[in-house]
Image: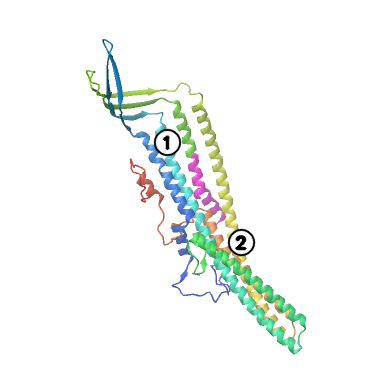
Amino acid sequence: MLRSGICLGVVVCVGLAASTARSEGLPEALAKAYQTNPQLNAERARQRATDENVPQALAGYRPQIVASLSAGLQAVRDLLPGNTFQSGNLKPWTVGVTVTQTLFNGFKTANSVRVAELQVQAGREALRNVGQGVLLDAVTAYTNVLANQSLVEAQRANVAFLQETQGIVQKRLNAGDVTPTDTAQAEARLSRGRADLNAAEVSLAISQATYTQVIGNPPSQLRPAETVDRYLPRSREDATELAFRQHPAVMAASFDVDVASTTIRVAESSLLPTITLQGSASRSRDGDPTLSTFGTDQASILGQMTAPIYDGGTAASQTRQAKELAAQSRLMLDQVRNQARTAAIGAWVAHEGAKIAVAASEAEVRAAGIALQGVSREAQGGQRTTVDVLNSQQDLILAKARLIGALRERVIASYTLLSAIGKLDVKTLSLNTPDYLPEAHYHQVRDAWHGLRTPSGQ
């Protein structure tokens, strides 16, 4: 009796057995995809760029220091008493430094830092969602290769059976036991079998190429893929509740609401006064011998307050715009929650349906196999025709193909449900690969005051 809904890849292929050293299991394939998938690595780079918004916002708390230097050549012609002239070439230069510290800017800096931190949190959830999608793509690519390998083996066995049947019918025709019609029927079914085998081989080649794209290397000998039922919720209500609360798309949308709400306060800061403190020091030399002084040294500390009175309505418009965007983000959150709930229900129903499909397909394969054996024996006794044997064989190969597809869908459905509740990740699956921790880069750059090189050395 076949195992019910546990593994994919053991339906019809006895010839797919390989040495353990060369085989690759689904966990290893998922680990490779997690490490090397270009889409996921690109999203990680995007998140590292988002982390830089925080030190940029924190720069508003820090002083701004500007150095200046000017030098040149100046031709001077002075008119002296008695209509006499004095000329010369001067080489004036000035060097200075200015330090500006913002003391108050309507809480713009504080709110900008808050916005940047919320963007980082939203980005982390978006990264987690992309990671789920990549892992699910890897599962699909892996199971497609397994299913197509099994289907190719089934079609090869079918062609071998039809070739044997065609040979037997030809011998019986030569002996006068059957008519040319039986031979033609056997040849037609053999041609169809070869066409089906070619189609299966084409599908296998395509799935292998997709596997290489997603996983990062061509498939070798793949081990049967197991489901992840042990990590799944026990009821549809639990699945929808988990999706509603912890799916990364929902979490990212929640942070987007906070970002939009805080952005309103950033816009409102333009309506408040700004207070700055500025210190400067400079030294200048002009080299004019006619002057009693040859240079000037200056130092100053100035406090300045500016308050907007009317800016043409720009700040007011920006504030209204931010409020509308906040309203939009709240509506988007409701939409994402509804989508997550619908996806969880769909994944749960598909998962339960896949179990039933596997059980039904297994029963169909068993019954079709028994029927083929019986029809073959009856045909040998003259109680069945050649077309009865061919039809029975066709029923069996179609049943096997449906079982292969059902087992494939069974595995994918379990991972899809795990993704729908937001738990398709390295930690849950216990994959043998380090988990990418976006907060590590965040803490490396958050308080960086200078430096052009990224922590990764790029």
Give the SS element for disc 2. helix
Q: Earlier in the sequence, mark 2 or mark 1?
A: 1
Mark 2 = which residue?
Answer: 353
Q: Position of residue 25 (x, y in %)?
A: 48, 67
Crowdedness near tag 2: few (<14), some (14–19) or many (≥20) residues, C-alpha within 10 Å? some
Disc ID at residue 147: none
Q: Give the residue type at disc 2.
A: Gly
Write the residue at 56% across / 74% down. 13
The residue positioned farthest toward the top in the image shown? 82
Q: Position of residue 269 (x, y in %)?
A: 44, 29
Q: Position of residue 243 (x, y in %)?
A: 53, 51
User: Is 334 rendered above or below residue 139?
Assistant: above
Between 458 and 129, which is closer to the camera in this rendering?
Answer: 458
Gap between marks 2 and 1 measured at Cα: 49 Å
The reply to whether residue 167 is in sight is: yes
Between 82 and 394, which is closer to the camera in this rendering?
Answer: 82
Q: Position of residue 310 (x, y in %)?
A: 48, 22
User: Is 103 rendered above or below residue 171?
Assistant: above
Q: Quadrant of residue 85?
A: top left
Q: Which portion, as a residue range, is magenta?
A: 232-257
Q: Give the residue type at disc 1.
A: Ser
Mark 1 = which residue?
Answer: 112
Give the SS element for disc 1. helix
Type of secondary structure dominating the magenta stretch: helix
